[in-house]
Image (tube, rainbow, N blue to C red):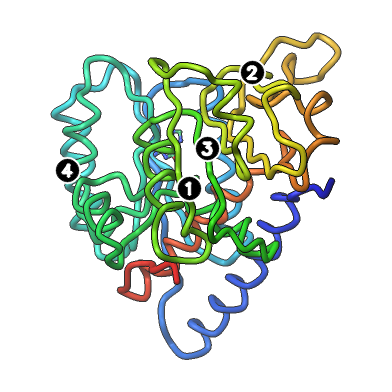
Amino acid sequence: MQLLDGKKTASDIRADIKVQVAELKENGFKVPHLAAVIVGDDGASQTYVASKVKQCAEVGFESTLIKLPDTISEEALLAQVESLNNNESIDGFIVQLPLPEQIDEQKVTEAVAPEKDVDGFHPESVGKMVLGLPTYLPATPYGILNLIDRYNIKTEGMHCVVLGRSNIVGSPMSILMARNTQPGNCTVTVYHSRSKNIRTICNQADILIVALGRPEFVKSEMVKEGAIVIDVGITRVKDSTKKSGYRLLGDVDFGDVAEKCSYITPVPGGVGPMTIASLLLNTLQASKGKRAVVA
Ligand code: GUN
């Protein structure tokens, strides 16, 4: 079993980005600038956004964090998005999800200018991804592709089972793994809440990508010997022995599953850091006026 070390790989990617930012500066270009909008004070969202901003500084990007109260109206949030669309100093921005219930997330997503949509959530970005046209890929699936690629895993011809069909992870992941690319060229099965025979389906997976948000859901009897297992889940569970008061659990029961796998991502330190690194890659592309393409 080999660990797919997202922490180390993301750090390598940030080092590459740092070199490119230094080159941009040397050649008289402005440094990339990412803005993040966060609404309300959900603990997990605050942590993610704080990491995004911190890592901008590490690679030499400018960043702007916009904190808004959870009582904000949809109109006021849309005005904020419009102002970021029109702010020439900002190359790309994200609006952290989820949003409070008085706000229509889809409306906000569609208000983001596609050329600044470094989350890849706008329908134009999603459409281009489906067609294989240059665009920003959503950060978590893009991070998983980058991780597979950096470990030089050739996925052609493999059976990839994706557990979950969310707009952010499961659906785009299934599309990307089926494309005629490396990583990609897989036969893909999407398992969701109405699917049957989970054990049989998972046992046929050469690559199992799990994005259900159900802690330790995947057990060893669901995994084929030698499979590659990618765990997207990050659930906070109470743990009074930790300083933070919680620990993080993936969707895969790591202790039970790991020794059956050829490769497996840990939680934390697997997909999470790769997601942020991939958002930085998208922002670098945005600053160059190009949308990312995955070869
Ligand atoms: N909430 C959970 N993941 C994400 C993400 O990748 N981007 C945004 N904007 N919100 C999220």
CB under 8 Å between callouts 4 and 1? no
Q: Is residue 163 above or below residue 285?
A: above
Q: Which residue is mark 1?
A: 141
**Is 127 left, or right, of 241 in this rendering?**
left
Give the quadrant of ligand 1: top left
- Judge left or right: residue 126 versus residue 50: left
Where does the N terminus fall, quadrant-wise?
Answer: top right
Task: Say which residue appears at 18% left-offset and 30% top-offset.
Answer: 76
The image shows residue 164 at horizontal and vertical percentages of 45, 28
Q: Residues within 10 Å of mark 2 (few under 14, many from 20)?
A: some
Q: Are marks 1 and 3 in contact (CB under 8 Å)?
A: no
Between disc 1 and disc 3, the foreground one is: 3
Q: Is mark 3 within 8 Å of ligand 1?
A: no
Q: Nearer the viewer, residue 152 or 26?
A: 152
Residue type (three-letter) at the residue carrying disc 3? Val
Q: Give the spatial CA distance, label 4 vs label 3.
A: 33 Å
Which corner quadrant of the image does residue 285 belong to?
A: bottom left
Sequence-earlier tag: 4 or 3:
4
Inter-mark Cα distance, 3 to 2:
15 Å
Question: Marks 4 and 1, Cα distance to the nearest angstrom?
Answer: 22 Å
- Judged from the image, the secondary structure of the residue bearing numbered disc 1 is helix
Which residue does the numbered mark 2 point to in the structure image?
Answer: 217
Count the labels in the image.
4
* Mark 2: C-beta under 8 Å from nearest atom of ligand 1: no
Say which label, 4 or 1, has the lower sequence index: 4
Distance between the alpha carbons at the discs numbered 4 and 2: 36 Å
Which residue is disc 3 drawn over? 161
* Label 4 sits on residue: 111
The amino acid sitting under disc 1 is Pro
Between circles 4 and 1, the one closer to the viewer is: 1
Q: Are marks 4 and 2 in contact (CB under 8 Å)?
A: no
Secondary structure of the residue carrying numbered label 3: strand
